[in-house]
């Protein structure tokens, strides 16, 4: 079994030497809704093409259970990948995830329920999105969300499907993946009155890798990045500039020149005193 | 436009971001990264060989470990093969769309000949940008004459192509302290330059910042200037 969520179970199945993911839905309407979205995406000229392979119903104990067969995605989740291969991979992975989101957005959809559990990383930072249960057409209400990733939870915006909604979740996703102190567990316990974005900003400055991504993360959390295309460009410029940031603290003092100047001063003072 | 980075090195990276990550980033941007390990006395070791293999794998390119005598022909072979490979992939994609498969062998001989002809033609006429990134650490010093020769040969081959071709050469670590991560020895050109003075004044230091150098080279290849912003003074965010 690959996973169990609020709306169904996913199992690994085989046809000959090909592997697929079979999802059995608990709620017919939700399941069908997800299939409708996947079908539309599978027809686009994007990386989601041919994602959906088959759709049918099973009869188990006299009950009809709808199921769908999708492309099988190998990989591990982001936290595991970073732990195994090093945090610096976040730069490549972030860029690739943004590309996926851009493709989705250009097809007219918002992912909606973007979280660590809904993306897999494999190979050299290759990213795939899984579980399209939360995918919503642009402009509609978000139908499936996970609290900590939802900007409504943080009172930072509406639960309407637009590109900046996904970008907010994207920023949270990165922070969560880099969160070595598991601060996010405590965020879930907070009451709306005590919840504050400042806690997130504090996390950003305290975490070395997040601090390098700070300009991007802040903008995304504040809803200042309107489109994922804009996000891609911003992300890219950060990847190239992070090495500059390390050098910005003042250049090493020219000790030799300082000592030379000091010795001249002392020489001059000596002459003055003795004459 | 085909874009390649060819890294010539003889050791492990030991400072800065991992070159494997830098190569993965290059691949994301459509730039293939090939690696040639030049060893004359077996100084590469297991770690160095492994790193070279990983950089090429992440960068979607090839790798070879050769003697400096074979450097010239290896550089040319790799450059040519990478172009053909990229075009084959692109053509394969189109075939898959039209026929549902990309197996050349399954096509009848007449069609197969046509497809291969298209691949050949495109390989010859497509625009090509190759950036050579040379490791200029102390141990590379005796191999630099071979590198110069390889550059000269590559320029000759590139000039002969029908499609526009450009070559750039960089080395790392940079000669000036506090400068770029890689220094440009030859900016984009297809003119035969006098290469005798190249690498003349190299400050051979102990560090091998392969990753940062690759990133700097990637920037040069994709032509984005250092100061590119999204229109609202992003660099100002860095002046803390």
Image: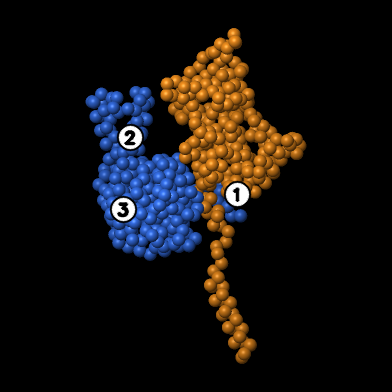
Please determine if labels 2 and 3 lie on a single subunit: yes
Name the residue tied to disc 3.
Answer: B67
Task: Residue B218: tell me if it is visible.
Answer: no
Chain (orange) = A
Q: Position of residue A270 (x, y in %)?
A: 61, 85
Image location of residue A209, percent across then percent down:
58, 47
For the N terminus of chain B, the quadrant is: top left
Whether residue A82 is situated above or below residue B10 in the rendered picture: above
> Mark 2 belongs to which subunit?
B
Query: Decide: marks 2, 3 in contact (CB < 8 A)?
Result: no
Chain B tint in image: blue
Residue drawn at point x = 64 percent, y = 34 percent:
A149
Count of numbered badges drawn on the protein: 3
Residue B158, horizontal then vertical, whole percent? 28, 47
Residue A22 visible, this orientation: yes
How packed is label 2: few (under 14 Cα within 10 Å), some, or many (20 or more)? many
List the residue tagged with mark 2.
B88
**What is the C-alpha distance between the residues marked 1 and 2?**
42 Å
Q: According to the image, what is the colour scheme of the structure?
A: by chain
Q: State which quadrant residue B80 falls in.
A: top left
A237, A23: nearer the viewer: A23
Q: Quadrant of residue B10?
A: bottom left
Going 67% across and 46% down the picture, which residue do you hit?
A: A202
Q: Residues within 10 Å of mark 1 (few under 14, many from 20)?
A: few
Vertical arrangement, residue A70 with respect to residue A92, above or below: above
Vertical relation: A262 (above or below) A70: below
Q: Chain of mark 1?
A: A
Q: CA distance from mark 2 to mark 3?
A: 29 Å
* Label 1 sits on residue: A208
User: Is B162 on the left-hand or right-hand side of B176?
Assistant: left
């Amino acid at each position: 079994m690959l996973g169990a969520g609020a709306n169904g179970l996913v199992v690994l199945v085989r046809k000959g030497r090909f592997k697929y993911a079979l999802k059995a839905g608990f709620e017919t309407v939700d399941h069908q809704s997800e299939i409708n979205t996947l079908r539309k995406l599978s027809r686009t000229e994007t990386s989601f093409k041919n994602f959906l392979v088959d759709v049918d119903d099973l009869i188990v104990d006299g009950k009809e259970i709808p199921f769908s067969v999708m492309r099988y995605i190998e990989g591990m989740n982001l936290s595991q990948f970073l732990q195994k291969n090093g945090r610096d991979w976040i730069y490549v992975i972030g860029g690739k995830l943004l590309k996926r989101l851009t493709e989705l957005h250009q097809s007219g959809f918002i992912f909606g329920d973007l979280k660590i559990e809904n993306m897999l990383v494999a190979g050299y930072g290759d990213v795939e999105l899984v579980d399209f249960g939360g995918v919503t057409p642009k402009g509609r209400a978000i139908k499936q969300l996970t609290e900590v990733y939802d900007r409504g939870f943080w009172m930072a915006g509406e639960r309407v499907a637009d590109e900046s909604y996904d970008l907010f979740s994207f920023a949270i996703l990165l922070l969560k993946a880099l969160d070595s102190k598991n601060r996010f567990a405590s965020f879930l316990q907070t009451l709306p009155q005590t919840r504050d974005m400042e806690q997130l900003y504090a996390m950003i400055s305290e975490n070395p890798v997040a601090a390098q991504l700070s300009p991007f993360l802040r903008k995304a959390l504040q809803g200042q990045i309107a489109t994922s295309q804009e996000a891609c460009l911003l992300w890219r410029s950060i990847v190239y500039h992070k090495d500059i940031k390390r050098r910005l603290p003042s250049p090493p003092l020219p000790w030799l020149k300082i000592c030379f100047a000091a010795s001249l001063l002392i020489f001059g003072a000596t002459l003055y005193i003795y004459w | 436009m085909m874009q390649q980075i060819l890294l010539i090195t003889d050791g492990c990276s030991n400072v800065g971001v991992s070159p494997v990550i830098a190569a993965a980033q290059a691949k994301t941007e459509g730039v293939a990264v090939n690696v040639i390990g030049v060893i004359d006395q077996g100084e590469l070791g297991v770690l160095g060989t492994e790193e070279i293999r990983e950089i090429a794998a992440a960068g979607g390119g090839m790798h070879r470990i050769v003697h400096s005598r074979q450097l010239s022909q290896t550089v040319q072979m790799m450059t040519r093969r990478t172009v053909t490979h990229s075009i084959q992939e692109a053509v394969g994609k189109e075939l898959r769309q039209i026929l549902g498969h990309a197996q050349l062998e399954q096509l009848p001989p007449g069609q197969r000949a046509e497809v291969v002809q298209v691949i050949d033609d495109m390989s010859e006429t497509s625009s090509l940008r190759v950036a050579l990134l040379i490791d200029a650490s102390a141990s590379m010093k005796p191999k630099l004459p071979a590198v110069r020769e390889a550059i000269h040969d590559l320029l000759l081959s590139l000039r002969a192509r029908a499609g526009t071709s450009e070559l750039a050469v960089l080395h790392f670590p940079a000669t000036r302290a506090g400068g770029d991560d890689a220094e440009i020895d030859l900016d984009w050109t297809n003119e035969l330059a006098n290469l005798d003075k190249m690498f003349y004044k190299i400050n051979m230091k102990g560090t091998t910042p392969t990753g940062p150098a690759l990133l700097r080279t990637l920037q040069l290849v994709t032509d984005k200037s250092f100061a590119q912003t999204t229109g609202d003074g992003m660099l100002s965010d860095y002046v803390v």
